Structures are given as C-alpha cells and as structure tokens.
Image: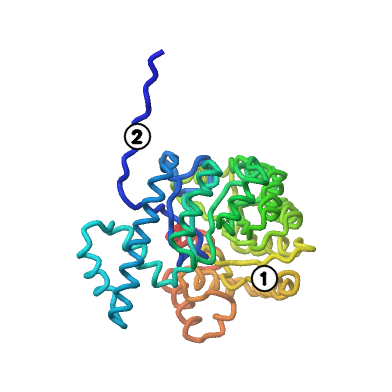
Amino acid sequence: MNMERKPKEIYQGFEQGPIRPPSEAESLLVRVTRNCPWNRCTFCPVYKGSRFSIRPKDHVIKDIDSVSRSVEIIQQTAREKEKASPAQIRKTAGNDPHLDPRAFNAALNWAAGGMRSVFIQDANSLIIKPSDLVEILTHLKARFPWIERITSYARSHTISRISDDNLKAIKNAGLNRIHIGLESGSDAVLKMTQKGVTKETHIKAGLKVKKAGMELSEYVMPGLGGKTFSREHAVETADALNRINPDFIRLRTLAIPDSVPLFDNFESGSFEKCTDLMMAEETLLFIESLNGITSVVKSDHILNLFQDLEGKLPEDKENILDMLRRFLAMTPDRQCIYQVGRRLGFFSGLLDMQNPRRLERAEKACKNFGITPENVDGMVDELMKRFI
C-alpha cells in the first residue's frame, strides 16, 4: 500500500497564542498547541475558524531556548548598565543575528513582570502526550530554575482521561496550576451550549487535579443558562464546586458577540439573555449555595459587573453577599448609573459610586446617551462587546 507521509512541519520561529487568563498577565507565554481541539462551545469566539494542531515538541524547545538567550542578553545589559532602558536593551539585542525578535519581545515583557510565572498555551495543552509535556516542562525548569508557577488551560474531558500517575508526573515536572472552564454545573446548560462535557466529568476532572497536588482554578459564567435555566445554572454549578473544592472560583459574565453561534439563538429569541439585574440575582443564589469549601472567589475580568466581588470562603462569604444585596436594593435609576459607569470603566465596584467625580461622569454619560433603566440592558450589551 502506498502511504503518503505528512510533510514535516518547518520551524517558523517563536510563537504565542491569542489569549491567557487575566491572572497570567505577567507570565511568559509558551505555545505548545494551537487553538482548541473542541472549538464547538456556542458562547466562545476565540478560535472559531481556526484549526487545532499540536506543535512539534522540538519547536517548543527551540522557543524556550530563544527566550532563554534573550533573557541572558537582558540580564547582561542590566548588569553592565545599571539603569538600562528598554531601548538600550533592544539596541544591544539588535547586534545578535541569531536572536528571534518575537522571543526577545516576549522575554522583555516577561522580565518587566519579574519572570516568576509561565503560562502554557493554547486552550487545552494537556491533550498532548504526557511524556512530551513532562519533557517540555523539565526543559523549561532547567532553563529558568527560578520560576515559581507554571499553569495551563485544560478541558475536563481531557483531564478525566489522563491517569493519576501521568498527572502526578506532570505536576512533579513543574505544572502547578490548571485553569478549567467549568462554565456551568447544569447538564442542561452544558448540553445547550455544546460544552462537550457533563457535570460528573467536571467533578471527576477537578478532583483528579486536586489529587495530583496542583492548584485548580474553575471558571464560572454567570448568565450562561439564560432566563430559562438561570436558577438551575446557579444551584447546579455551586453543587459541582462544593464537591470539588477548587482553589479558585473565577467569574466570567456571559457576553454574546455577533461572531458566536449563541448570537443566532439570541437574535431568534430561542435564548433569552439575562439582564444585569437577573445575573446579580443569579450570582447571589450561586454564592449562597456554596457551602463547605475553602475556595477563593475572584471576579477578575472586565466583563463582570462587580470587579471587586471577591474573598475567601467561608469567612468572606457574607461580605460578598452583602455587596450583591446592596446593588439589588438600589433604585432602578441608581442601578442604571452603576451599570453604565462600570461598563465605561468609571467604576470597578459599588464603593466607587461614593467618588463624586466618578459618579458625575457616569451620570453625565447616561444623560448624553439617553440611557435609562428601560433601555440600559441593550446599551450594556453593546458596550460589553468591545471587551470580547
């Protein structure tokens, strides 16, 4: 039989993927896979139209070596010139014909953040052979022995199929935090949004990560169930997390850009999007339903209505609930001003409404754009699309 061999991929230089968690803003981004192997979630715009591929292991190693060489130049220049500017460092780097400029820029940004953490890209890098990931992590630690944290996104479906021994080996090689897009614990919501996983698989994967000794961040998407499944979404998601007890619970409010499949359902009326008020009520029910766990709740994303809604469970639970209750107790006019001020970046939390200048800017924006409690949710939807 005449079998055609797939042509060997040629190394094109250092690569970085399109996204990383907000908590990895200062991390070095090391691209092990490209795009998402699932890529069917109806709410996600990131990788639509892009093919998934696994980068050759030796290409990833070359990327790491390129950054290592760049870091050496940065450190050497900093030693020779006590207050070397980025421009001076770039000039020095320009004299090295073997330096990859993309790797150098990544190294320079990483150096500015303290070079303490690394994020493995793209959407589900644990899908590669465990032995290959161990080799990449081992090389990464050899080149940068001082790094404190190496993290990656992963799908629950993928983790659930990795043996405990392999997960432990990956952890021992240096991967010490995993970010999972749980999104919901409701099987109805997971099916509706084509998440490709069940509640029980989410729980199984989360427990496996914890058993391996890695930190676990689980992402929850308020509003994902729409009006139909809002209550079920809140209660079932809390139940899943109560059984997992992740280190972090990170909130990511649903937004629906025009480019995602869910937008068609939204336009047709088959998916009824929750208003900000409904999502605040849903989040209140969700937090009320979290019991017996010691997770840290984070709201570290610009899409969230309350960016300062965070705390350690169980001791900060009442403070979190109090913030939500205060918003829900406001008059519609005050809620409207807060919504607009938050989406325009004037407010990060309710306390910012006590700042006269910020409050005045939000009030003026409502007046100038004709935003009222009756039309605020439509205006907010448009504002949120800017941040997708």
Residue at the spot 56% in from the left edge and 64% down from the top edge: 304
**Residue 16, image quadrant:** bottom left
**Kind of residue indicated by mark 1:** Leu
Classify mark 1: residues with Cα within 10 Å, few (<14), some (14-19) or many (20+). many
Q: Position of residue 152 (x, y in %)?
A: 53, 54
Question: In front: 244, or 351?
Answer: 244
Name the mark on residue 67: none
**Residue 292, image quadrant:** bottom right
Q: Is residue 226 visible?
A: no
Q: Position of residue 97 (x, y in %)?
A: 21, 58
Q: Position of residue 240 (x, y in %)?
A: 73, 52
Q: Is residue 236 above or below residue 304?
A: above
Q: Which residue is mark 2?
A: 8
Colour pattern? rainbow
**Kind of residue indicated by mark 2:** Lys
In three-dimensional space, the C-alpha distance between marks 1 and 2, rounded to whole angstroms, equals 55 Å
Question: In front: 341, or 240?
Answer: 240
Residue at the spot 35% in from the left edge and 34% down from the top edge: 8
- Dot 2 lies on which element? loop
**Residue 166, image quadrant:** top right
268 left or right of 97 in image: right
Name the mark on residue 324: 1
